[in-house]
């Protein structure tokens, strides 16, 4: 199995079995965002304990990339602090928008999120993969 196939498999698995799909009642942070160029829509709910992200849930409708990106993000965020979340966001964006050799260094930090690396070649898909992170940023900055 090639690395691309493996990545494809991770994306499909998250698309078919999304982690953290649903809603949180009385969330501490919440945001909605969309990606009109593809038709993706996402709503994100966060439960915070001080600086720490205790729980994340999402509801959305969109393509396989955006939905699996949301699931992958949720899986990665729980237990992280807000500062760590912004750090991840920055690394993730760097990974999907550049082919820099630095990506290898990011791999360790990003874990399964690296599966979305393939979108780098498709600028229109970069927006799909970024949507959950843009929504997160919006939720945490409000
Ligand atoms: Zn999309």
Image: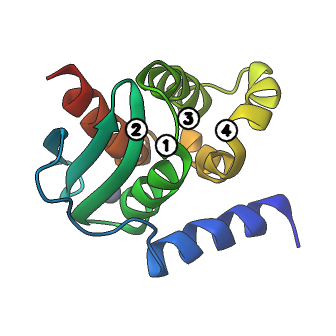
Quadrant placement of the N terminus: bottom right
Q: What residue do we see at 34% from left, 26% from top?
A: 50
**Nearer-the-camera pick, 17 or 129:** 17
**Residue 124 in sight from this viewpoint:** no
Q: CA distance from mark 3 to mark 4?
A: 11 Å
- Of labels 3 and 2, earlier in sequence is 2
Q: What residue do we see at 53% from left, 24% from top?
A: 84
Q: CA distance from mark 3 to mark 2?
A: 24 Å
- Of labels 4 and 2, earlier in sequence is 2
Q: Is residue 21 above or below residue 126?
A: below
Q: Element type at marker 4?
A: helix
Q: Element type at marker 1?
A: helix
Neighbour tally class for label 4: few under 14, some 14-19, many 20 plus, Cα within 10 Å: some
Whether the residues at callouts 3 and 4 have beta carbons within 8 Å, the answer is: no
The residue tagged 3 is 96
- Of labels 1 and 2, earlier in sequence is 2
Q: Is residue 125 left or right of residue 36?
A: right
**Residue 3 in sight from this viewpoint:** yes
Q: Is residue 26 left or right of residue 140?
A: left
Neighbour tally class for label 2: few under 14, some 14-19, many 20 plus, Cα within 10 Å: many
The residue tagged 2 is 53
Q: CA distance from mark 3 to mark 1?
A: 18 Å
Q: Position of residue 99 (x, y in %)?
A: 69, 27
Q: Element type at marker 2?
A: strand
| Quarter, ligand 1 | bottom left
Whether the residues at callouts 1 and 2 have beta carbons within 8 Å, the answer is: yes
The residue tagged 1 is 77
Label at residue 110 = 4
Q: CA distance from mark 1 to mark 2?
A: 7 Å
Q: CA distance from mark 4 to mark 1?
A: 11 Å
Foreground label between 4 and 2: 2
Which image quadrant for residue 96?
top right
């Amino acid at each position: 199995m090639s690395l691309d196939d493996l990545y494809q498999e991770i994306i499909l698995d998250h698309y078919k079995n999304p982690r953290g799909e649903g809603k949180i009642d009385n969330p501490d942070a919440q945001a909605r965002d969309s990606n009109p160029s593809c038709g993706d829509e996402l709503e994100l709910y966060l439960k915070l304990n001080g600086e720490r992200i205790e729980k994340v849930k999402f509801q959305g409708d969109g393509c396989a990339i955006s939905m699996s990106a949301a699931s992958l993000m949720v899986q990665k965020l729980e237990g992280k602090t807000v500062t760590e979340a912004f750090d991840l966001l920055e690394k993730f964006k760097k990974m999907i928008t550049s082919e820099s050799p630095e990506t290898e260094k990011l791999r360790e930090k990003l874990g399964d999120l690296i599966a979305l690396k393939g979108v780098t070649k498709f600028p229109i898909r970069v927006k799909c993969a970024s949507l959950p992170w843009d929504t997160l940023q919006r939720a945490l900055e409000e």
